[in-house]
Image (cartoon, rainbow, N blue to C red):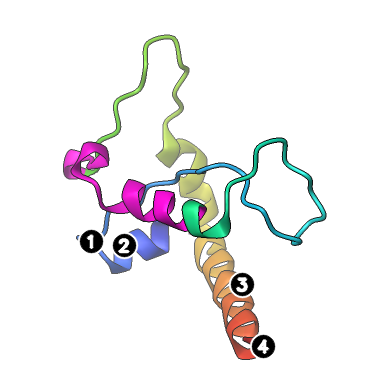
Amino acid sequence: MGTLARDNPRLSIAHCHPGLARSNTFGLNAPNPMSQDEAGQRAVFHSTNDRYAVPAGLVPVPEGLETKDSEAVLGPMRERGLDEKAWNFTQEIFSACTAKA
């Protein structure tokens, strides 16, 4: 995500999980699955609604949650080039998936 954020400084990234969608992907039988269409609608809503906008990339941390200095954890990994390796791997997977589509 760091590479994506660095290359797109005006991009806001939000992770949301709308719930299990009805599909045959993993053979899961969710107790109350939503349709794939509804899951897509929820994802678009979370991605575009101002209610979930985060000013200047700041995310409030609820009281009681422990935080870590991400640079202390990720800095040594970046120095070894792991961020670029992970991004390149991700791009290879996406390319392979889209080639099959």
Instruction: Compute the Cα span from label 3 to label 1.
Output: 22 Å
Instruction: Name the spot of residue 2 as percent of width and height, x first.
Output: 40, 57
User: How many C-alpha atoms fall within 10 Å of the one at disc 2: few (<14), some, or many (≥20)?
Assistant: few
Residue identified by numbered label 4 = 100
Tag 2: amino acid: Arg
Look at the numbered discs 2 and 1 and tell me whether their residues touch, using CB distance below 8 Å. yes
Instruction: Name the spot of residue 40 as percent of width and height, x first.
Output: 46, 57
SS for callout 4: helix
Tag 3: amino acid: Phe
Instruction: Indicate yes or no whether the magenta region holds residue 59.
Output: no
Residue identified by numbered label 1 = 9
Residue identified by numbered label 2 = 6
Q: Residue at x 27, y 39 (%)?
A: 52
Q: Residue furthest top?
A: 64
Residue identified by numbered label 3 = 89
Numbered range of the magenta stretch: 39-56
SS for callout 2: helix
Instruction: Compute the Cα span from label 2 to label 1.
Output: 6 Å
